[in-house]
Image: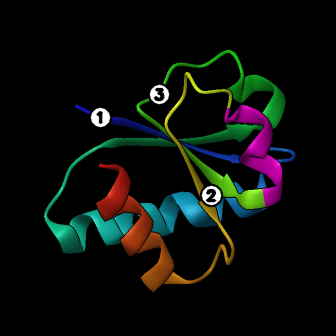
Amino acid sequence: MKKILVVCGNGLGSSFIVEMNVRTVLKQLGMEAEVSHTDLATSKTEKADLYLGAKDLVDVLDDGTRNVAKLTNLLDLDELRSVLEEHL
């Protein structure tokens, strides 16, 4: 099963909201994945199939070894759906 890690600065508010939205969109797409959220510092040490978060924040994770999806609007379900379809 794929693992999606939603990343934000502190690993609390916005990443939790996006995690819930990811679960909603995955269900709509008929896909399954393990989804969790964390802060930026912790995300650097965790393994995942997809790292997802705000563009300006997750740029630091995009080192060529990780599959990083960058969102411009964390609350836009259409953008989230498009990003998930592209990266999964």
CB of mark 3 within 8 Å of CB of mark 2? no
Q: Neighbour class for label 2 at 10 Å: few (<14), some, many (≥20)? A: some
Q: What is the C-alpha distance between the residues marked 1 and 3?
A: 8 Å
The residue sitting at 22% across, 31% down in the picture is 1
* In the rendered image, the vertical position of residue 33 relative to residue 76, given as above or below: above
Kind of element beneath mark 1? loop
Q: What is the C-alpha distance between the residues marked 2 and 1?
A: 18 Å
Q: What is the C-alpha distance between the residues marked 3 and 2?
A: 15 Å
Q: Neighbour class for label 1 at 10 Å: few (<14), some, many (≥20)? A: few
Q: Report whether 73 appears left or right of 13.
A: left
The three-letter amino acid code for the residue at tag 1 is: Lys
Which residue bears the numbered disc 1?
2
Q: Earlier in the sequence, mark 3 or mark 2?
A: 3
Q: Nearer the viewer, residue 40 or 16?
A: 40
* In the rendered image, the vertical position of residue 83 relative to residue 31, given as above or below: below
The residue sitting at 34% across, 59% down in the picture is 86
Q: Report whether 75 appears left or right of 87.
A: right
* In the rendered image, the vertical position of residue 60 relative to residue 66, given as above or below: below
The residue sitting at 83% across, 27% down in the picture is 41
What are the residue bounds of the magenta stretch? 56-62
Label number found at residue 70:
2
Q: Report whether 66 appears left or right of 71.
A: left
Residue 72 quadrant: bottom right
Residue 36 spot, x, y in % from top left:
52, 41
* In the rendered image, the vertical position of residue 73 relative to residue 50, given as above or below: below
What type of secondary structure mainly makes up the magenta span?
helix
Label number found at residue 48:
3
